[in-house]
């Protein structure tokens, strides 16, 4: 038996009510635009990242990762370099890691509004 026959038998005997497709198709992706390395280098330069980190409110509540801004503000330079590499890599791949897509939101009711 070949892999397709094995898949068909599994579906027939174990997933009778399923609408699983037995044919494999390769997903298509749109071509990614050209990457401008100079722009990425400028966007994630250490001085720019330092400026952004220093302007964060140090004691604001952390996001889902639990990292407060004050921790980043007092972290060694190597941590900021690693963050810059992660952000630049994410930009190059046009992929945002799931953890960076998450946020905590707290709605505060304002009296009289």
Image (cartoon, helix red, strand yellow):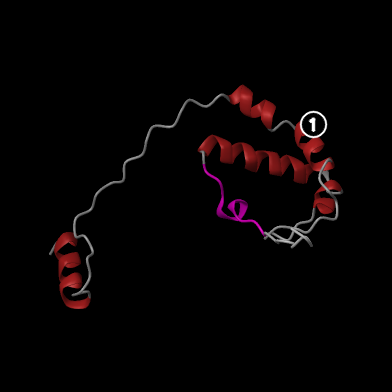
Instruction: Write down the quadrant of residue 6 in the picture.
Output: bottom left
Q: Compared to 49, does 59 lie above or below?
A: below
Furthest residue to the front? 112
Residue drawn where x is 56% and y is 24% of the image: 36
Residue 89 located left or right of residue 74: left
Residue 77 located left or right of residue 64: right
Q: Secondary structure at mark 1?
A: helix
Residue 81 located left or right of residue 7: right
Q: Compared to 54, does 21 lie above or below?
A: below
99 falls in the magenta region: yes
Instruction: Write down the quadrant of residue 66 in the picture.
Output: bottom right
Residue 20 located left or right of residue 104: left
27 falls in the magenta region: no
Location of residue 78 in the rendering, given as x and y in whole percent from the top left corner: 77, 43
Foreground residue among 25 and 56? 56
Q: Compared to 83, does 30 lie above or below?
A: above
Foreground residue among 23 and 18? 18
Residue drawn where x is 59% and y is 25% of the image: 37
What segment is highlighted magenta in the picture?
A: 95-104
Residue drawn where x is 70% and y is 44% of the image: 83
Location of residue 104 in the rendering, given as x and y in whole percent from the top left corner: 67, 59
Please identify the quadrant where the C terminus is shown.
bottom right
Location of residue 87 in the rendering, given as x and y in whole percent from the top left corner: 64, 40
| Mark 1 closeness class: few <14, some 14–19, many ≥20 residues within 10 Å | few
Magenta-drawn stretch, dominant element (helix, strand or loop)? loop
Location of residue 62 in the rendering, given as x and y in whole percent from the top left corner: 75, 58
Please identify the quadrant where the N terminus is shown.
bottom left
Foreground residue among 38 and 16? 16
Residue drawn where x is 54% and y is 35% of the image: 92
Q: Badge 1 is on which residue?
A: 47
Number of marks in the image? 1
């Amino acid at each position: 038996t070949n892999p397709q026959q094995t898949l068909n038998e599994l579906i027939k005997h174990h997933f009778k009510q399923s609408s699983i497709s037995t044919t494999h198709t390769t997903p298509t992706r749109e071509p990614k635009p050209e990457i401008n390395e100079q722009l990425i280098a400028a966007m994630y330069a250490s001085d720019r990242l330092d400026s952004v980190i220093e302007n964060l409110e140090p004691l604001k509540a952390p996001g889902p990762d639990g990292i407060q801004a004050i921790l980043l503000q007092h972290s060694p330079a190597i941590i900021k370099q690693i963050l810059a590499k992660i952000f630049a890599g994410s930009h190059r791949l046009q992929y945002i890691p799931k953890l960076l897509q998450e946020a905590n939101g707290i709605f505060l009711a304002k009296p009289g509004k």
